[in-house]
């Protein structure tokens, strides 16, 4: 009997598919049943070859070799996961296997993972595609009943290959050229450098900003405070202090005012739209201070392990019409104590219908918005982060089924000696969807105004002048940077027209699936750093922007490339034309770097020597604390010297840094408090906390030194644990 090989992206998903398909026989890197053989990648198993794999002379970085332009590109198995690649290849090439079912993540990158494996394994067997948005048993069963023809996803694969080849051609050549030219580790790329340029542009806005003082007036009565307004647009602030003082002098002796109008307007506010990945990452940062990477990693756990949310890497905030029949089951799945009041209200309705605009086929591309699956969660099995993130998703989902938030907005106009003062108030008529968000109730108590009559006079107790200062735009944090990458014009008003035009013509910088990685890459290459929650460019980052050719840091150009990749995925543009332009661009960039007469200077050189190559070390601010790194790019030595911890200072209660080595480790706080690790442990033990033994401390330190786990590393760990 012929069989089908099912190729999943990760072991955890493969095990779920195998269980549903009845594949229980364990093999070397696969699970087999009577009809199917389920095997898996570990993220990417195959990648583009490095330059030296085309020609050994490229192993040494030399300007005269650039640009390196493979024709054609060569694929190679990743050395660390070669064993699993060989296991997958063996199953693909079995004589009894007649077809392949691609079951990797349903998106551009997932398509690339599978197709590169098939190409390197030289599999020419017919291909079908499993395209699902959740990994519940029900979704897997339905997906296998409705398998797609693999040929329908050829354009998606072409777009993925175009993206990978463009990143190689542009990023590798520009990075090598800059690094060799200036003898420094200078990494650049078609998305990361424009993102860095956007952060620098915001810093320039802040530096160039000149604060101005503005003035206003307030009239105080027994029951309310009224704000002065003037001009055709009812402005409330005036930069002319003399003018405001003259009006104040005129009004100084006034004892009463007259109500000229009382206008009440009924208003309705719909629930916020459902989450796409970027919006959820922004909300995770706003609510909990999480990085984009933290939110995505937690979301992956909810999707893959717990199976209680739909596909994470989506750019849509809408649902498709074919999902209508599943909505009731999804609401029932979250009919749990924290949400029961809302679910009962929704389920009692004669028709379960989300608010207008939620269901929109035209605004759903590969995947719909992130919503709960039909599977009920076991809340006690979720980690604290998973519980918080799931809560955000469920509340946003339930909110769109509830009535709009309805209120009456009242504006009272008070006239005092010819000057107009106003007060605004709100009376809630129906909390609507806000019932889901108990914590927001306080904001609904906004100034209920006293009852007054038009033409009625009222005693004025005092009129005073107010003043304030105009403020520069805020620095980016990870939440606002994500929003800026999604829509540059909203954040860069006043900057170049190219940047503003980007948002009109394209979807922004990068994609929902790549933005978190881009931000991490900027931190890891030490061109940006965090101070508190705010992001700053480093000296290295600012110098890099001076050295990089202008086009390579243009958000407009990068946005245009993303738009062209989307066209390739839709079949309206040829990959060959896009790559021809990328090769031409790479040649121009390398030529400009070669011809530049600019200089790069390390301004963070320490007096400490690298133990490997004896060159002076650089001090950098990593995302988790200070590090010493070797300035020689080929050496690669690095050492953590201070790191942020969760230990709280006993004086000011802020988080402390850990510094030093061995028995000399100590906690240091910005307020000046210093405490040896041994003293900290005694204090913690005496207050009832568990003492950290030496092994625990070493384990903690090792975790801080290591980079964040990649999806491949996570998959490897899970696989090893299973075996």
Image (cartoon, rainbow, N blue to C red):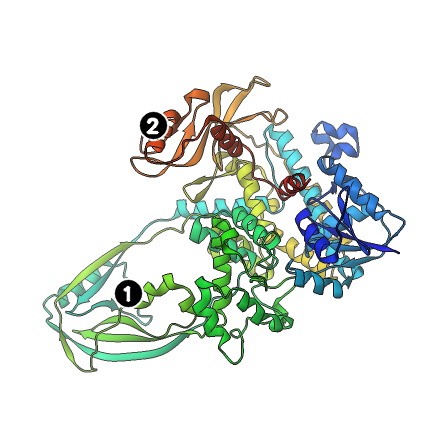
Q: Quadrant of the C terminus?
A: top right
Q: CA distance from mark 1 to mark 2?
A: 49 Å
Q: Quadrant of the N terminus?
A: bottom right
On screen, residue 493 versus residue 587, left or right, reads left
**Which is more toward the observer, 105 or 334?**
334
Percent x, y for residue 450? 21, 74
Visible residue check, residue 627: no
**Which is more toward the observer, 127 or 687?**
687
In the displayed structure, 18 sits above or below 649; it is: below
Picture disc at residue 7: none
Picture disc at residue 674: 2
Visible residue check, residue 210: yes
Percent x, y for residue 49? 75, 38
Which numbered mark, 1 or 2, is in the foreground of this view?
2
In the displayed structure, 355 sits above or below 125; it is: below
The answer to which quarter of the image holds residue 4 is: bottom right
Disc 1: which residue: 236
**Which is more toward the observer, 538 or 76?**
76
On screen, residue 219 versus residue 491, left or right, reads left
Lower sequence index among marks 1 and 2: 1
**Which is more toward the observer, 719 or 641?**
719
In the displayed structure, 231 sits above or below 382; it is: below
């Amino acid at each position: 009997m012929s069989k089908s090989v099912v190729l999943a992206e990760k072991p955890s998903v493969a095990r779920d598919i195998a269980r549903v398909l009845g594949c229980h026989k364990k093999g070397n890197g696969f699970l087999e049943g009577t009809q199917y053989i389920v095997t898996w990648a570990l993220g990417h198993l195959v990648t583009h070859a490095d330059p030296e794999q085309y020609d050994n002379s490229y192993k040494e970085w030399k300007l005269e070799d650039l640009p390196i332009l493979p024709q054609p590109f060569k694929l190679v198995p990743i050395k660390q996961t070669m064993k699993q690649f060989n296991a997958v290849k063996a199953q693909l090439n079995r004589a009894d296997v007649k077809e392949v079912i691609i079951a990797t993540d349903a998106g551009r990158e997932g398509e690339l993972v599978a197709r590169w494996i098939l190409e390197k394994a030289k599999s020419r067997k017919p291909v079908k595609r499993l395209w699902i948005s959740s990994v519940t048993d029900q979704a897997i069963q339905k997906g296998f009943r409705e398998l797609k023809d693999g040929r329908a996803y050829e354009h998606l694969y072409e777009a993925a290959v175009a993206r990978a080849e463009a990143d190689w051609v542009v990023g590798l050549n520009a990075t090598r050229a800059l690094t060799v030219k200036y003898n420094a580790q200078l990494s650049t790329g078609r998305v990361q450098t424009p993102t860095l340029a956007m952060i620098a542009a915001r810093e320039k806005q802040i530096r160039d900003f000149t604060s101005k003082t503005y003035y206003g007036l307030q009239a105080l009565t027994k029951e309310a405070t009224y704000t002065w307004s003037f001009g055709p647009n009812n402005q409330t602030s005036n930069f002319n202090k003399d003018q405001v003082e003259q009006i104040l002098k005129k009004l100084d002796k006034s004892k009463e005012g007259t109500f000229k109008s009382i206008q009440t307007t009924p208003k309705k506010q719909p629930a916020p739209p459902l989450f796409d990945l970027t919006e959820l990452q922004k909300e995770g940062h706003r609510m909990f201070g999480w990085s984009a990477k933290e939110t995505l990693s937690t979301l992956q756990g909810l999707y893959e392990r717990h199976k209680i949310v739909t596909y994470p890497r989506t750019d849509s905030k809408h649902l498709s019409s074919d999902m209508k029949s599943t909505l009731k089951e999804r609401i029932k799945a979250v009919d749990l104590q924290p949400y029961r009041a809302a679910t009962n209200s929704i389920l009692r309705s004669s028709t379960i219908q989300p608010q207008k605009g939620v269901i929109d086929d035209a605004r759903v591309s590969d995947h719909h918005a992130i919503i709960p699956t039909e599977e009920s969660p076991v809340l006690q099995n979720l980690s604290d982060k998973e519980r918080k993130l799931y809560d955000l998703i469920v509340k946003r989902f339930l909110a769109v089924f509830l009535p709009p938030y309805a209120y009456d907005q009242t504006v009272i106009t008070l006239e005092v000696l010819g000057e107009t003062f106003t007060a605004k108030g709100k009376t809630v008529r129906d909390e609507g969807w806000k019932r889901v968000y108990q914590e927001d109730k306080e904001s609904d108590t906004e100034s209920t105004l006293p009852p007054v009559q038009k033409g009625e006079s009222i005693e004025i107790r005092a009129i005073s002048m107010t003043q304030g200062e105009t403020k520069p735009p805020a620095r980016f944090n990870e939440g606002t940077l994500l929003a800026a990458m999604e829509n540059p014009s909203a954040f860069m008003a006043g900057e170049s027209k190219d940047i503003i035009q980007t948002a009109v013509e394209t979807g922004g910088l990068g994609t929902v699936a790549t933005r978190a990685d881009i931000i991490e890459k900027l931190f890891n290459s030490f061109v940006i750093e965090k101070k508190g929650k705010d992001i700053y460019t480093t000296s290295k980052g600012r110098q890099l922007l001076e050295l990089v050719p202008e086009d390579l840091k243009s958000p407009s150009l990068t946005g245009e490339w993303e738009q062209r990749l989307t066209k390739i995925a839709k079949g309206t543009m040829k990959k060959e034309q896009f790559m021809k332009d990328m090769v031409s661009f790479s040649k121009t960039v390398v030529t400009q770097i070669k011809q530049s007469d600019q200089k790069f200077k390390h301004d963070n050189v320490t007096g400490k020597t690298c133990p490997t190559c004896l060159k002076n070390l650089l001090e950098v601010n990593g995302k988790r604390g200070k590090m010493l790194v070797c300035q020689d790019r080929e050496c690669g030595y690095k050492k953590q010297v201070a790191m942020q911890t969760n230990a709280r200072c006993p004086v000011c209660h802020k988080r402390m840094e850990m510094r030093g080595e061995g028995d000399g480790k100590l906690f240091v706080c910005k307020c000046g408090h210093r405490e040896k690790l041994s003293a900290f442990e005694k204090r913690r033990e005496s207050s009832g906390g568990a003492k950290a033994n030496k092994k625990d401390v070493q384990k903690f330190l090792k975790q801080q030194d290591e980079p964040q786990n990649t999806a491949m590393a996570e998959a490897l760990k899970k696989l090893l644990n299973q075996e």
